[in-house]
Amino acid sequence: MILSPSIPSKVKKMTFDPTIATNTLEAEGLRCPEPVMMVRKTIRTMEDGEVLLVTADDPSTTRDIPSFCRFMDHQLISAQVDKMPFQYLIKKGMD
């Protein structure tokens, strides 16, 4: 798996399992900053502990989504960025 330098190293070790997602966001075809704006809007409607599956094809998401998670105190559980579309599992909150 090839990961962007922005993807935290602990994410590399986790298996990508989209079945754990409780919510989904299709961001294919959107370009920066739209994917992250949509992630923010979607996560605001979720409960702490719920997991969002994001599917995107904008290469900037490999940098922007991990940064968003760190800044907003959400967990980037896993990321699949070795092929298109990219997929991210984000858990709302840090617990």
Image: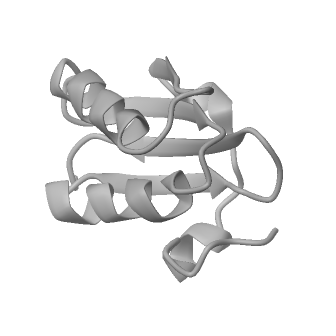
Asked if residue 71 is positioned above or below residue 32 in the image, the reply reads below
> Which residue is located at x 61 percent, y 54 percent?
59
> Which residue is located at x 65 percent, y 33 percent?
18
Which of 29/48 is in front? 29
Q: How many marks?
A: 0
Question: In the rendering, at what x and y percent does residue 42 appear?
Answer: 29, 23
Asked if residue 54 is positioned above or below residue 62 in the image, the reply reads above
Question: In the rendering, at what x and y percent does residue 83 appear?
Answer: 83, 50
> Which residue is located at x 51 percent, y 52 percent?
61
Which of 12/4 is in front? 4
Please state, as top left, top right, bottom left or bottom right, where the N terminus lies in the image: bottom right
Q: Is residue 10 left or right of residue 49?
A: right
Question: In the rendering, at what x and y percent does residue 5 appear?
Answer: 56, 81
Quadrant of residue 50 in the image? top left
Q: Is residue 86 left or right of residue 58?
A: right
Which of 72/14 is in front? 72
Q: Is residue 1 left or right of residue 63?
A: right
Question: In the rendering, at what x and y percent does residue 2 appear?
Answer: 78, 72
Asked if residue 32 is positioned above or below residue 41 in the image, the reply reads below
What scheme was used to colour the molecule? one colour
> Which residue is located at x 24 percent, y 35 percent?
40
